[in-house]
Amino acid sequence: MQLCTIAGHSHRTRVQFLGIEIEIQGAVLRPRKETELLGRVAKGLLDEIGGDTICVDMCCGSGNLALALARHSADARVMACDLTDDAVQNARHNVTQLSYHEQITVMQGDLFHPLTGLEGGVDLIVSNPPYISTSRLLCGDRSHLLREEPREAFDGGPYGITLHTRLISEGAGYLKTGGWLAFEFGLGQDRQVGALLKRARAYEEPIWYTNEAGENRVVCARKR
């Protein structure tokens, strides 16, 4: 059996995400430029919904997507959720530092568990969940990612879509009729994601968004 060593994470750095400077502390994913596509899609959905909105940034990490939504719309109330202590602490730090604490509430728990009471009341759910398979991450071609960032930010289970499966099925119960689910996924996962959305029978036909190379990387779907 091959054994793989995972390094610790004690770095602190600053990154830019959609023009917002975000500080990264501890074992937290650094926002990638590629996730700005999801941010732009989500902002467009906010414009379409209009008015006061309740939004959820699921698997929020440093809080970059939550901050982008709050900055885009002063009428958006955002719940940012994550499982790990480091992510929650980092997101709360950024929300406070950037003075969005009146718009954004950072919550800790397993996916939608912190949102009990919001069933059927959410206008928009956005998420950049982990989407790399466990084997590729621990001992495969993506193991280098764990030198500086935590496993929880990348590990999407045996096939890379464990969190997507839950996001699609559980998210439907929290969205309003006509509410939107928008999320990022890995290269080549669009067929699996499309099948999951169809199987859920809770959403209209999905809309796909491509990166600069023409590859599907973001999807949004409206609740029936």
Image (spheres, rainbow, N blue to C red):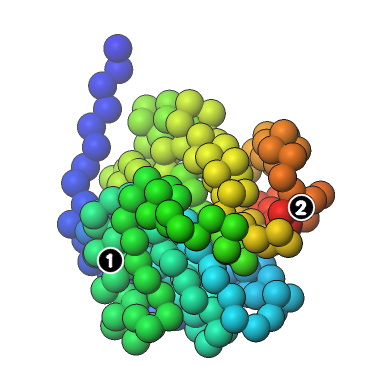
- For image coordinates 50% across by 60% down, the residue present is 118
- Residue 168 image-quadrant placement: top right
Instruction: Name the spot of residue 92 as percent of width and height, x first.
Output: 29, 71
Residue, disc 2: 224
Mark 1 belongs to which amino acid? Asn
Q: Measured from the top left, where is residue 125 in percent x and y?
A: 57, 60
Which badge, 2 or 1, is on the more N-terminal residue? 1
Tally the numbered discs.
2
Disc 2/disc 1 C-alpha distance (Å): 35 Å
Looking at this view, is 81 or 162 the one in front?
81
The three-letter code of the residue at mark 2 reads Arg
Count neighbours of disc 1 (C-alpha within 10 A) and say few if under 14, some if 14 to 19, many if 20 or more: many
Image vertical order of residue 161 relative to residue 180, above or below: above
- As helix, strand or loop, the secondary structure at mark 1 comes to helix
The image shows residue 221 at horizontal and vertical percentages of 72, 54
98 or 170: nearer the viewer: 170
Residue 181 position (above or below residue 158): below
Question: What label does residue 73 carry, if any?
Answer: none
- Check the image and name the residue furthest to the front: 117
Mark identifier at residue 90: 1
Residue 91, quarter of the rendered image = bottom left
Residue in the picture at 36% in, 31% down:
138
Q: Percent x, y for residue 71?
A: 50, 83
Q: Is residue 180 above or below residue 78?
A: above
